[in-house]
Amino acid sequence: MSATPSPSPGARRRAAGLTFRVKLMLSYAGTVALAGALLLSVVWLFLLRYVPEEAAPTTGGFMPGRGDLLRAFVPPALAAWALLIVVGLVGGWFLAGHMLAPLGRITRATRLAAAGSLSHRIGAQGPDDEVRELADSFDAMLARIEAQVAEQRRFAANASHELRTPLAITRAMLDVAAADPDRDVDALLTRLARVNGRAIELTEALLSLSRAEGGALDPVPVDVSLLADQAAETFLSLAESRGIALQLETLPGIARGSQSLLQQLVVNLVHNAIVHNCDDHGWVRIGVRSAQGGVGLRVENSGPVVPSEMLPTLLEPFQRGAQRAHRGEREGAGLGLAIVAAIVRAHDGSLTLWPRDDGGLLVEVVLPAA
């Protein structure tokens, strides 16, 4: 005996009920009816209760009694009360429709966004009320989502291109080696190890960028000056091999953030400053100091002139400086400053780049102090 599968929660239809417009209409009509009933009650309490029960003769005729007044007052009062209810229903229907019109535009925009159209905007007009605030917040959310989706698509395309390159090189070397009976296995292994190392570095950089953009932090007090000292010590041999002098000027600076991410930030900045430098007699200055109520890290280097229009592109993933084009050595995947920018955003800090007039770049990061 087979059991009939129950529909998923998303496939179940909601129970039929009154629309929000009908509920508002009934609320308006109920308020009007209640106000009319209170008015009639006031007339009864403060007027009719003081009228005698029976009619009484007077010198000019007679005074009607309470029963006479009730027979004369109740039918038109009930008719007026019924008219108030009708007016409340009709007026409430049109008033609710007018009040809910902006919500209808928000609903249509939501459905378009759910269908994949993120470029649509509500563009609410009118006074700055709660509905206008909701519409503006929804437009801002759509703009941010659209920018993030576009950035993710561009990043995915660049990442697939960058990862495809070492794989294609590996396949080409293997094909050539397979067709060459006199192949040099040692040389082939050396080249394969170099290409594989580049693929590993690229993958690790992608993971670091993803982690930084995720913003999952476990903030602790971090000594930025100590991280700068460690980075300078780590890259001292690389700098000396290139004829680059490292200059370290640090003051105590305790920031609040992720120890591993801030270490990655300092390492990337120092490594970039060494890599994008002059071949001989270059220099790199690393400084830590207090700045703008936080901790400032400055990394400055000599090198080729950086055009001002190139600065925004340096923070994009897979963007490399023009000076790398003529070098035959492995200089990275163009993710260094992109990772730095993502880490700074995750820590609510600021990142500023200045091109030096005589060549090179000055990078300043300001992080919240602990």
Image (cartoon, rainbow, N blue to C red):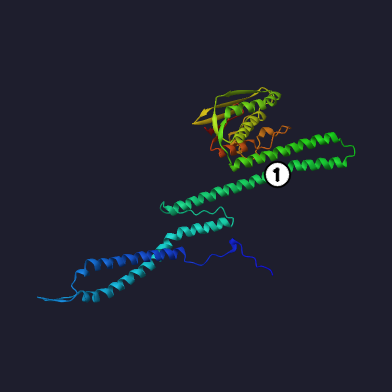
x, y percentage for residue 368?
Answer: 52, 34
Which of 308 and 7 lies nearest the eye of the viewer? 7
Vertical placement of residue 79 versus 185, above or below: below
x, y percentage for residue 279?
Answer: 69, 26
Vertical placement of residue 146 versus 32, above or below: above
Q: Quadrant of the rendered structure where residue 286 is?
A: top right
Look at the image and tell me whether residue 160 can be seen. yes
Look at the image and tell me whether residue 356 can be seen. no
Q: Which residue is mark 1?
A: 161
Residue at position x 76%, y 42% in the image: 167
Q: Amino acid at mark 1?
A: His
Name the secondary structure under disc 1: helix
Residue ranking furthest to the front: 1
Which of 288 and 279 lies nearest the eye of the viewer? 288
Residue ranking furthest to the left: 59
* Neighbourhood count class around disc 1 (C-alpha, 10 Å): few under 14, some 14–19, many 20 upward: few
Which of 313 and 346 lies nearest the eye of the viewer? 346
Disc tally is 1
Q: Quadrant of the rendered structure where residue 44 is?
A: bottom left
Residue at position x 43%, y 64% in the image: 23
Q: Is residue 361 left or right of residue 196?
A: left
x, y percentage for residue 324?
Answer: 69, 33
Residue at position x 27%, y 74% in the image: 74
Residue at position x 72%, y 33% in the image: 330
Vertical placement of residue 231 versus 32, above or below: above
Which quadrant is the N terminus positioned in? bottom right
x, y percentage for residue 5?
Answer: 65, 65
